[in-house]
Image (cartoon, rainbow, N blue to C red):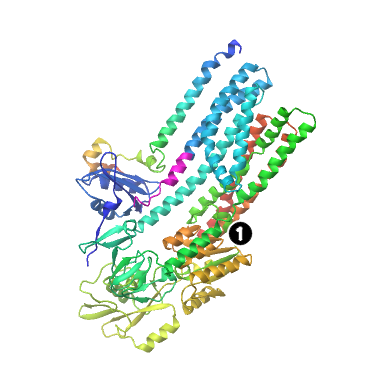
Amino acid sequence: MSAPERDWAAFVTNTDEGKAHMDLAVDGITCAACMYEIEYGLRKLEGVEKARVNLSSHRLSVDWDDEKTNPSPIVDRLQRLGYKAYPFDPAQVKSRGDAICREILRALAVSGFAAMNIMLLSISVWSGNASDIDPETRSFFHWISALIALPTVVYSGRIFFRSAYMAMKAGRLNMDVPITIGVLLATGLSMWQTVRDAEDAYFDSAVMLLFFLLVGRYCDHIMRRKTRSFAENLATLKAESAAKIQEDGSALDVPLSRLSVGDRVLVRAGERISVDGRISTGTSEVDQSLVTGETLLQHVGEGDLVYAGTMNTYGVLEIEVTAAAKGTLLDEVNRLLETAMEGRSKYVHIADRASQLYAPVVHAAALLTFVGWIMLGVAWQPALVIAISVLIITCPCALGLAIPAVQVVASGLFFNGRVLLNTGDAIERLATVDTIVFDKTGTLTMPETSLSKKHALSEDQLELAGRLALSSSHPLSHAIARATGAHQALPDAKESAGQGVEALINGVCAKLGSPTFCGVPAEQLEQAKVQQPDTSFVAFQSGGEAAQLLPVGQFMREGATETIQKLKYAGFAIEILSGDHKGAVEHAAQVLGVESWQAAMKPQDKIDHIEELKAKGRKVLMVGDGLNDAPSLAAANVSISPVSAVHVSQAAADAVFLGDSLAPVVSALTISKKARWVMNQNLAISVVYNLIAVPFAVLGFVTPLLAALAMSGSSIIVTLNAVRLRMLAGTSTQSNQEA
Amino acid sequence: MNRTMEVLIYLIPVALVLGGTGLVAFMWSLRSGQYDDMEGPKWRILDDGDLQENIASPEAAKRKAP
């Protein structure tokens, strides 16, 4: 059966000039030379109007004339140039995050402009106040400051006002509430001072506060945008599409977003099933390890349910797409996931917890100051000015930057450690972890099957086996072909579906397939199965020689044993919760040296166990990849999943790690511990700064000059302290790389 | 306001307009996507593929390239 034609129309949009346009994720761009190669290579194609590579996001944007060419030659040319490319599904690329980022950047630009100009005027007023400025000039300067500051506060401040309003409406108190109160009071007081020709106005403080805080917000956003765009590229390059069966019976590859319930989809031998549905024709065996954790193949036939993410082995299946029906695994996972997500939103960020302590204290201090000065017999206006100056000087500039600055530096370190963060507060939650729960299949083991090194084949035989394997579509053959590095299929190999392949080479018959197909004695197979319980066996036989067994299975990830040892040494309690059968889990636990393990667990069992641990006061990190892990990923205090995980799990996890090695889990934990330490330090610095500044303010000694110095000084100290995290963590990441 | 300060009536608006022009220029550059790719452009200046002589014979350009 030939590969179905691709339906590119779903990926193409039209530009304003009437040209067709497509955005592609490109894999393999390493330097600027790749950029030229791709751009010139594509421009030479007839009909291509524009090809531009974005070197920071590794994306390519192509415009072409619809009448002269179509996307197929473009993708083909990229393939021939040696770059794997796949278009973004316009329905799935989220531009929303980008819009927020731009809004912050615009607000930042406006507040920066305003802060500079107002500071120019303020410094003149301050030096004038110390010498001989006349009241008219000062008043003139204050009015101009007001003219710049008022629109700025409205425009740049709305990001904070909006978030503060949302929090108050929900009955919560977040960091933006004291910020909003501080900015509004500072602006209001300054307006009043300006109207009554007073000496001091605090416009510069209000606008500078906005500027510093927006810098923090913006850094936070670009860091997350970087990881998000990287994750989108990875998801797109997975090229998840399905061969939809058209009315005329032909199959057309369409993106998943174009499928609806009731559509029929064709899945060929050796392909991953990309939809949830019911088999309408065909029988096969499917590998469900990515979904349930079960490593043994399951026989399926007409009417059986299959899940997205499972691997079809030898048969051709026609599947009718179904929505998650009541009582299916998917339905259960969705239901559990919803409940688990609700529980998670109860977590309060460090920054919000700090502001919940901070706001009442500071506001009470301001109130007491006001009352105190009134009782000392001061008129209410000057008393109010002093009270508000207490709020301005304690304005949470340092506090507002203390946590985001550390998060930015830390997520940069995570990125270098090959961990992508889904949520910013994952760092602080990771830092408190004391128990780590691993899933087995796909997490501790490699997500794909591979060939074990324990076999008795010579180099030549292995190459022959690899070439035979290339002629077969069975997933176990894929594993052998990959392991041997063979790339030339044998010309006249004959495949018996579900059995094996055979071919004649120089008159000698060579066979690769199931042990019975190659005539392996039953006793030998039994014995091997006892020795390696979690392994499937493929047999190879050539000429008159006895058949040899090739153990194929899901083996441990690179460095899994070292990682577990390191984690145990660092004092974490390690557990394995797996959906796989007992023998396989027991074997894995023994190899890794994990005492606490449980097998054959359903999603509900995993959640129950995690809740039990949490009830005991443990902070649980869940590391898992399967569909069955998704609810427990959401239920745990914090979660990480490998990049090979199914969609649902990746979305439920707080972070995703790249690559085959398990080592990023260790570095994530180390970095987050250090980040948490620096966060606490920053909070302490803010508190100390307030302890020094508040008495001055209460006594009425604060001038706008002092406020400006204190604010920028404390912000800079907090930011520099956050950057110090890079040095703290630098030593440990280096030692990780060496290891 | 004394006479020496009168000049400020012109100078401050001029300063604000100049600053404002910079702000508007930044907003324009943001909207037109100047910051979408911060890596590529610094390499593009070294690329000679768009010179007339190189377009005429791309092979010659390749030979020149290091």
| Vertical position of residue A140 compared to residue A457: above or below | above
When the figure is inspected, residue A537 is found, relative to residue A29, above or below; the finding is below
Q: Position of residue A644 (x, y in %)?
A: 42, 63
Image quarter in which the N terminus of chain A is found: bottom left
Q: Quick one: label 1, few (<14), some, or many (20+) residues within 10 Å?
A: some
Judge whether residue A657 is colored magenta: no
In which quarter of the view is residue A250 placed?
A: bottom left
Report the front residue among A26 and A738. Answer: A26
Q: Position of residue A82 (x, y in %)?
A: 30, 55
Residue named by callout 1: A432
Q: Nearer the viewer, residue A675 or A178?
A: A178
Q: Let me know if residue A94 is in the magenta part.
A: yes
Question: Looking at this view, is A362 or A670 the one in front?
Answer: A362
* Residue A639 drawn at (x, y percent): 52, 61
Viewer-nearest residue: A100 or B66: A100
Magenta stretch, residue numbers: A89-103
